[in-house]
Image (spheres, rainbow, N blue to C red):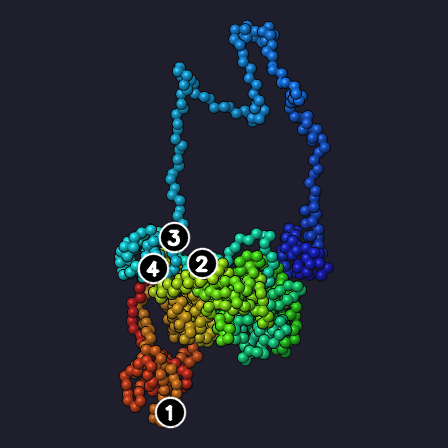
Amino acid sequence: MARKRVHEIAKDQGVPSKELIAALKKSGVEVKAAASSVEEQVALDALKSASAGNGAAAPAPSAAAPAAAAAAAPPTAAKPAVGEKPVRPVRPPDGQAAGGAAAAKKKRRVVIDSQAARRDSGPQSAPRRPPRRRGGRRRRPLLEEPRLGPHVEPERPPLKVPSGATVREVAEIFGVGSADVIKQLMTLGEMATLTQTLPDETVEVLAEALDRSVEVVSAADEVSEAPVFDDADADLVDRPPVVTIMGHVDHGKTSLLDAIRETEVVAGEAGGITQHIGAYQVHRNERTISFIDTPGHAAFTAMRARGADVTDIVVIVVAADDGVMPQTVEAIDHAKAADVPMLVAVNKIDLPDANPDKVKGELATQGLNPEDWGGDTIFVNVSAKTHENLDDLLESILLLAEVEELKANPNAAASGSVIESHLDPGRGPVATVLVQRGTLHVGDSVVAGPQWGKVRAMQDHTGTHLEKAEPGDPVEVLGFDGVCEAGERVEVVENDRKARQLAEERAHRLKTEQLARRQSRRLTLDEVFAKASEGELNELNIVLKADVSGSLEALQDEIAKLPQDQIAVNLIHSGAGGINESDIMLAAASNAVIIGFNVRPLADARRAADREGVEIRTYSVIYKVTEELRAAMEGMLQPEEVEQAVGQAEVLELFKASKIGTIAGCRVTDGRLVRGADVRLVRDGTVAWTGRVGSLRRFKDDVGEVTEGQECGVVLDGFQDVKVGDVLEAFETRQVEKTLE
């Protein structure tokens, strides 16, 4: 017979795929998933053998057993008839008694024990009673104290301290006085008041000094623990799978989803590029699939950083004529980090230069091996333009969902996650919510992080107004008092008062955490070896960005050559281009350090790095990168040149002078510009030139420096290719001693 997929054979035979997989494995056939292909006859034989083994009848009890049991039963005395008096046993005459002479001298007392038959018949010797004293009182036995083993003090659970706790709160949790905490802080060289917020690292050092075991809990950690529910199996019903479409720009993600939904979403978007996250539903064979279309991966990374788990399956879309691109690799990295099953859709196969086999080879290097090559990743060749193989794509998605066994309780209090949120001028704050458990009704009081509200209206992706939303349904919710952040958890509470109280507590918690984050940083290279020597850190996570792919490959090779005996260098993501906000969120979620080679962080990325406490190190010489990594890992930190930002200016206009050349008309946006200072020219996030400020004028006068908010004319020493929109970053370098503290 021909080879067929396991789920097709199971569907023909009317049995679940898991039962057929178990039968095949029992018969010695190795099957990885329900999409694997086997011989149909082999599968049928395995099913027959499994059914024959399960259908064997148990041996019937022997008919002679009751008779034997009756024969073995001890004879019982006949009971007296109703109304008759029981006959007392009569003592035999003296002459007939055994030992008549002894019986004549002393009368024997016969006791009938009616409970003898109920006792265990085993040979158990009753404990001997102590002898009587002459006075008639028995001696009391000596009490022996039980032997106690070595005293083992039970291990106390760690104390949970909220991130951003004040000195007074830490003292209350530790069970010590506030004066003791302040005194301990003074010994550590830090002065603090009762209401001052303490960084997480300081709390851990205090706990070690006061002999306490602590666990610093952030608001995100508490939210991630909330979705664990213990529902009975009878209350669970099947829910639609949540599928996220990811891939490189212009590879046809929204067009593919548009072809599946048979609507015209792309026609209404600016330039044909997705401008926001769309959540839609598709019906297939009486089953529903919820799709999430993401613009890039910033929202997906933000959800992961906040601990949200909204995606069940990720579909990686790759254009057959373009192949694997940087954002494709980034999408695969994020899906692997979130531990979500992946499915690859090779799009645009209708084009003349389409090459699906090339795409398979490139994705195999990323760890996604096709099934026809012996791997376990499903590849589907599709065309969003001609609608080719779209049915196969939906069948593959439903197959993965069947293996995952996605269920939810629709009768519980509703909860879910925010997919996106924006401020509509006419409707106010609008949040796209994916319901994951329970049923959301209009009029419910909801809370999402620091925002709360009452559901005033709900509608689906087609604009239809809804009265309720069940598990797996993405809906737009109106009624929040503010704009929610993507990834925040939404919960239904009893009333508005409870929702307002929870939102205010969450807002206060986030404010204190932000204060604590400003006072501490996540991880720097100076702390790596110190923590590794104490056994607290075994690997260093790095996000690597470079200006071109050639420099990126060279840096990866140099980092791979570093000795990794004590610390393993884990390169969680690498790519070409400027450092963006997505890199910052990925580093914050993975506790990583960002290393940039000839690239600079964008304005939004710099603000996100300050907010999240992520360290960014930029270099212009490749061996400086490996030298500092080696020094950080080995602990041999030598004095280094540290760069300190002086100011930043933006080029607004250009002027030409015959004797001078190009004069850049600038406005100082941060700090100050100094004549003769080192300066770099940044264009679109990439360093275009590094040199010195040759001339600095304000109006017609030469000046030594220009402060923030003022305009000036700048001539760069030896560089004329200046363009409007370029950014000038002035900096100075100085020698600083490295320490491991």
Question: Percent x, y for residue 248?
Answer: 54, 73
Mark 1, secondary structure of its residue: strand
Label 4: element kind: loop
Neighbour tally class for label 2: few under 14, some 14-19, many 20 plus, Cα within 10 Å: few
Mark 2 and mark 4 lie on one chain; the one further toward the N terminus is: 4
Q: Position of residue 100 (x, y in %)?
A: 57, 6
Task: Please rate how many residues cluster around mark 4, counting C-alpha atoms within 10 Å: few if below 14, some from 14 to 19, many from 20.
Answer: many
The answer to whether any part of residue 208 appears in the image is no
Q: Are marks 2 and 3 in contact (CB under 8 Å)?
A: no
User: Tag 2: residue type?
Assistant: Glu
| Label 1 or label 4, whichever comes before in sequence order | 4
Q: Mark 1 points at which residue?
A: 656
Residue 227 screen position, x and y as percent: 50, 58
Image coordinates of residue 32 in percent, x first then y, are: 61, 58
Foreground tag (4 vs 3): 4
Q: What amino acid is labelled 4 in the image?
A: Thr
Between the residue at mark 2 and the residue at mark 3, the CA separation in whole angstroms equals 15 Å
The alpha-carbon separation of the residues under discs 1 and 4 comes to 59 Å
- Is 258 located above or below residue 28 in the figure? below
Give me the residue at 54% from left, 75% from top: 274
Task: Identify residue for label 3.
Answer: 159
Amino acid type, residue under disc 1 in the picture: Lys
Q: Disc 4 versus disc 3: distance between alpha carbons? A: 15 Å
